[in-house]
Image (cartoon, rainbow, N blue to C red):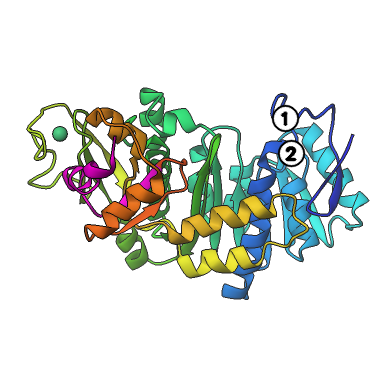
């Protein structure tokens, strides 16, 4: 059957049932991901004018590569499945691309290809964890590595051992598990890049219900890799009062992990890490990407709203959930806007966070949040 996405028409096998059955070759639920990728590539090309070669490393139907090619990128689509290659070739040819000249479709193991050829931008969109492809992507890529991870349960600590195996880190299943997932992924990617003397700067990162997405700008020198590793560290989380704090470093510092929670004196403390504790966005870049989303994109409104939220988000390593806090305190939640206004009035910085409607960030600790908001809660 034919589908049209971002103004590009392509053929995909079988019936598409939105959100229920997912074709191996084309997932309609990833349209926002692909629309934002195109807008990000447009913004990145301005930032790095020498960037031209784009690799769609797991191309399947060819939709990502085709959309980038239509946008003027010098595209290589790669897949190890013969059926995918045939489909991607026919989709690019139908769109008028002369394969071998304007664009190429390569039947190969993506890791082998990434070690052999140099690309300016590599896009990893595997089924499940991207980590088996991370080393090869960082080995030679020049400017930007784009990563999707769909294994959200291992990433956020819900499938604990699987997460430790895939990411070489200890994630914890807390009320900010979605953010834990992004920071676990970024940590593992940063450590992979560092092995090649490559530093990474996340310029746009977000999570949706079933995946995590990040864009990493590369700095190909040992000092950039060193600076990247300095963004990693540990989190301590109190399961009783939801207090949390963090410390930078790849080894635990003298005051972390603690034996007792400094807020409630409880001993049910979870330690997570190494996690990416640094910034996950370049705000000016995110604003630029938002401005480049055309009205014609099906997901334009959703994409712009998401990017605006990312721009406004405070840079803290965790977020709070208002309902979880109120439940823990035995109080009824009020409107988020009133709740945040009370915190602001007490002199703290606040912002909503894109993870959910009740997620927020603040520089107040859990005791300070209660003190500032208690009078307004039922
Ligand atoms: Zn506590």
Q: Position of residue 29 (x, y in %)?
A: 68, 37
Q: Residue at x 46, y 43 (%)?
A: 355
Is residue 160 visible in this depiction of the protein? yes
Mark 1 / mark 2, whichever is N-terminal: 1
Q: According to the image, label 1 marks what residue?
A: 24
Q: CA distance from mark 1 to mark 2?
A: 7 Å
Q: Which residues are magenta?
A: 359-378
Q: Secondary structure at mark 1?
A: loop
Q: Nearer the viewer, residue 307 or 128?
A: 307
In this rendering, the answer to whether 304 lies above or below 5 is: below
Q: Is residue 364 magenta?
A: yes
**Some atom of ligand 1 lies within 8 Å of the CB belonging to the residue at label 1:** no
Query: Whereabouts is ligand 1, in terms of quadrant?
Result: top left
Give the tally of numbered discs.
Answer: 2
Inspect this view and state whether residue 316 appears.
Answer: no
Q: Is residue 288 magenta?
A: no
């Amino acid at each position: 059957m034919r589908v049209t996405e971002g103004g590009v028409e392509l053929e995909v096998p079988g019936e598409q049932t939105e959100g229920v059955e997912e074709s191996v070759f084309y997932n309609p639920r990833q349209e926002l991901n692909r629309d934002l990728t195109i807008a990000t590539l447009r913004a990145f090309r301005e930032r790095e004018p020498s960037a031209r070669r784009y690799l769609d490393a797991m191309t399947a139907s060819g939709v990502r590569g085709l959309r980038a090619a239509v946008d003027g990128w010098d595209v290589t689509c790669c897949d190890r499945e013969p059926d995918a290659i045939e489909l991607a070739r026919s989709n690019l040819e139908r769109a008028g691309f002369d394969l071998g000249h304007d664009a190429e479709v390569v039947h190969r193991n993506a890791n082998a290809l990434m070690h052999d050829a140099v690309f300016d931008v590599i896009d990893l969109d595997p089924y499940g964890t991207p980590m088996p492809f991370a080393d090869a992507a960082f080995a030679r890529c020049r400017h930007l590595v784009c990563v999707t991870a769909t294994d959200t349960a291992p990433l956020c600590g819900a499938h604990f051992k699987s997460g430790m195996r895939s990411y070489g880190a200890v994630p914890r299943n807390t009320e900010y598990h979605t953010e834990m997932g992004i920071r676990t992924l970024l940590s593992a990617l940063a450590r992979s890049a560092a092995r090649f003397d490559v530093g990474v700067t996340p310029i746009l990162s977000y999570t949706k219900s079933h995946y995590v997405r990040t864009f990493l700008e590369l700095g190909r020198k040992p000092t950039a890799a060193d600076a990247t590793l300095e963004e990693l560290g540990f989190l301590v989380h109190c399961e009783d009062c939801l207090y949390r704090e963090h410390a930078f470093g790849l080894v635990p510092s003298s005051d972390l992990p603690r034996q007792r929670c400094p807020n409630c004196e409880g001993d049910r403390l979870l330690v997570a890490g190494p996690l990416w504790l640094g910034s996950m966005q370049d705000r000016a870049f995110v604003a630029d990407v938002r401005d480049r989303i055309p009205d014609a994109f099906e997901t334009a409104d959703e994409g712009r709203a998401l990017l605006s939220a990312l721009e406004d988000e405070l840079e803290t390593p965790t977020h709070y959930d208002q309902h979880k806090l109120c439940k823990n305190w035995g109080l009824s939640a009020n409107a988020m806007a009133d709740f945040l206004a009370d915190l602001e009035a007490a002199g703290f910085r606040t912002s909503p966070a894109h993870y959910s409607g009740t997620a927020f960030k603040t520089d107040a600790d859990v005791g300070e949040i209660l003190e500032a908001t208690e009078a307004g809660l039922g």
